[in-house]
Amino acid sequence: MTHQSEQQLEKTLIEQLERLGFSPIVLEDTNAMVANLKTQMERFNQTTLSTDEFTRILNHINKGDRFQKAKTLRDRFVLKRDDESYFYVRFFNMDQWCKNEYQVAQQITQVGRYENRYDVTLLVNGLQLV
């Protein structure tokens, strides 16, 4: 039986994901993750979001349990813009999955009730999913 270090296992996994079209990204903490999410949401929805607009999106996607969040991410969100207009925010392209942006990050530290470090994180359109 062969032995493989955790670091080598992560490296091999990331290389395989890159061959599948995942873009490597360095996200060291929660702030970097949120900034990346804003950038990816703007790119995916082809718009620019103000800080207040993005905060409303974050509040929307953070509501409920995991089942409610899964439903939320499949739907569109009607965002009331700062100028009082409305914009439909999409989180995923469910019809053409290849139009989503896939990223892989390594060793992200997040601080909440506890400090956690995740070995490999998969993101779709900036959303941390796995």
Image (cartoon, rainbow, N blue to C red):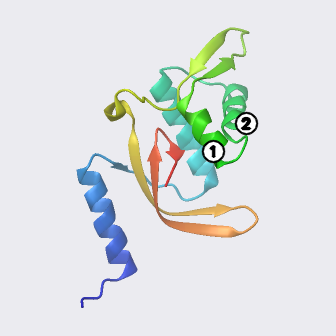
Left or right position of 118 against 7: right
Badge 2: residue crowd in 10 Å (few <14, some 14–19, many ≥20): few
Residue to which mark 1 is pinned: 67
Q: Residue at x 72, y 43 (%)?
A: 64
Q: Position of residue 86 (x, y in %)?
A: 66, 11
Quadrant (top left, top right, bottom left, bottom right) of the N terminus: bottom left
Q: Secondary structure at mark 2?
A: helix
Question: Label for residue 37?
Answer: none
Q: Position of residue 25 (x, y in %)?
A: 42, 51
- Quadrant in the rendering for residue 15: bottom left
Numbered disc in front, either 1 or 2:
1
108 versus 73 height, above or below: below
Q: Give the distance between the C-alpha atoms of the residues marked 1 and 2, in whole angstroms.
A: 16 Å
- Quadrant in the rendering for residue 67: top right
Q: Residue furthest right?
A: 113
Identify the mark nearer the N-term, 1 or 2.
2
Q: Three-letter amino acid code at disc 2?
A: Asn
Q: Residue at x 57, y 50 (%)?
A: 32
32 and 3: which is toward the camera: 3
Q: Residue at x 51, y 55 (%)?
A: 27
- Quadrant in the rendering for residue 60: top right
Q: Position of residue 44 (x, y in %)?
A: 46, 28
Residue to which mark 2 is pinned: 59
Q: Three-letter amino acid code at disc 1?
A: Phe
Q: How many marks?
A: 2
